[in-house]
Image (spheres, rainbow, N blue to C red):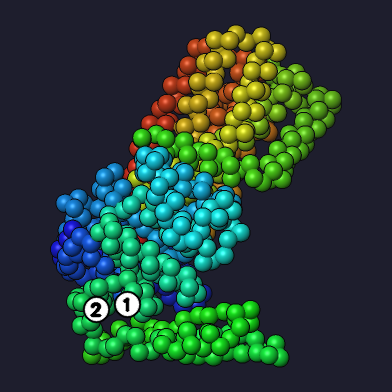
Amino acid sequence: MIEVKNATLQYTTFKRSQGLKGVMHDFFKRSVIQVEALSDISLTINEGEMIGLIGRNGAGKTTLIKLLTGILPLRQGEIKIDQMLPYQREKVFLKNIGVLLGQRSQLIWDLPAIDTYDMLAAIYELPKQMYNARLTWLSEQLEVTELLYIPVRKLSLGQRVKCELIAALLHRPKYLFLDEPTLGLDFVTQKTIYKILRLENQYHKTTIITTSHYIKDIEQLADKVIILNKGKIIFNDKLEQLPKELTTEILFDIDFLNSKSVEKKLTCAPDKLNEILAKIPAERILRVSQRGMELEELILQFIKGGQYMKYLYVFLASLKAKLIYRTNIVLEYGLTILQVGVSIFVWEALYSQKALVVPNYSLEKLNVYLFLANFLALSFSVAPAFRLATQIKSGRLSTLLERPISLYGEHLAYFIGDQFLGIVINLCLVVYFGALSGISVLMLLLLVIYLAFAGVMFFSLMMILGMLAFWLIELWPLRSFVTACYLLFGGRYFPLSHLPNKVFIVIQYNPFSLVTDIPARFLTVGLSGYELMQYLIVTLGWTFIFLVIYRLILKHGLRLYEGVESI
């Protein structure tokens, strides 16, 4: 049962002034506006009910859905689903909900849908037998069995939506939230989706809450309607109690070729559709689409009147997506080699003229250092920052927040999969250059352990930087800043030990140096076990600090997330 009592939600936005003068004024002092997305909402939804949630743009529909699914925290009032508070995002709660939010995809774009389903089965800890049976039944009902092994990017819109619906239903959720589930689909696909959702409700007593601007969705998927206007409920009753007949204005458009191969269009009512289709040869029918009354009109009239396996599957999905684009991999490593080559060329010129020499580094050792520092940077990538930032700006973060999986853990598993090839190459380089330098097996093992902790530390920093997207309008300043810091403070152009001693003593402990400069120095000029342990302790300290900052920023950032896309 879903119980909402006196739920009120406000968020802060800014009134922007017009013109250059206004922009300058806003730069120093903004006019703050409090927007009330929901105002004293109270409702009860019983188990197995099918609810249509409708309203004008900005009425508060999506805000309510985000509160019910735990994406947004409720600050005033109370929401309970089976006596659980959604914003606490308990594992039991997240396993009981399924979400299909408009055109936001759960499917991995470059992989077949089956790979996403395997990952979701691990995330939701589905027994293999149940998963296989469930997937078979859903794919047969939606007629997509043969599409499961085709890359998602090659599917049509209707095919993708069917596959998205499977992703939402795969774990047999007790509560299903749908946002514009049939947007842009032809009537045949719509009818298939209506059928499967009705079966889910009939067989499993699934509670289905649908938001839509398309009246046919509400008619087919709702026994009860809730209408929101300006954050308040203005109607909450059975569908037949609405003050207007819903089905009278539904029409079908039939596009076909006549005997002279000229494209024509006919419009008919539902009761005439089969009769007209029977008169037109099937090979001449181009498309059949359905038009219905816009809910906007209705509303206006009414107002006026297994726990870690999930991360393994995320890792595997990321790895497979990475390996698909071989050209990108070749370019990535090719550009790194080119960058190293330019640096080596510059230093060889400096050494040959004796214009500049790095203490303790022969030209050969310096070349090895530059090679290692830049190749290590491939594994310790800044990509997680921009993946998270893009998810925040596009709204796709909502999909992750609705899954029973840690946001940090999902991104870490994805990052390891994406960088796995680089990690393997760098481990081989560590062993090779360690053997050339005569470093003992024990010290090499200690270096590998150090690199693992350094990787987690650096990843945590990237997650913090990515969450700055909660406050940024554009992402390019963040990318430029991170890249510059990495090049300057990571020792990718020269060993940091070449800096003045007072500067080096401080800068050697920065996070960028710890993942590139320190390992490269260890393998070229050498570090003692005591020094490496010292750097390991600093790395653990940074990790602890970053994790604390991550939790704080995520908590405050999610409050801003509602202001970007909540109503």
For the residue labelled by badge 1, is the local secondary structure a helix, a strand or a loop?
helix
Q: Quadrant of the C terminus?
A: bottom left
**Classed neighbour count for the residue bearing mark 2: other residues with Cα under 10 Å, few (<14), some (14–19), many (≥20):** some
Q: Give the camera-side residue of 255 and 475.
A: 255
Mark 2 vs 1: CB contact within 8 A: yes
Residue at the image point whose x is 66% and y is 33% from the top: 374
Find residue 159 and name its label: none
Question: Identity of the amino acid at label 1?
Answer: Glu
Find residue 239 and name its label: 2
Can residue 31 be seen in the rendering of this structure?
no
Q: Position of residue 167 (x, y in %)?
A: 43, 54
- Residue 16 versus residue 166 in the image, above or below: below
Can residue 404 be seen in the rendering of this structure?
yes
- Residue 248, picture quadrant: bottom left
Q: Residue furthest right?
A: 352
**Classed neighbour count for the residue bearing mark 1: other residues with Cα under 10 Å, few (<14), some (14–19), many (≥20):** some
The Cα atoms of the two marked residues, 2 and 1, are separated by: 8 Å
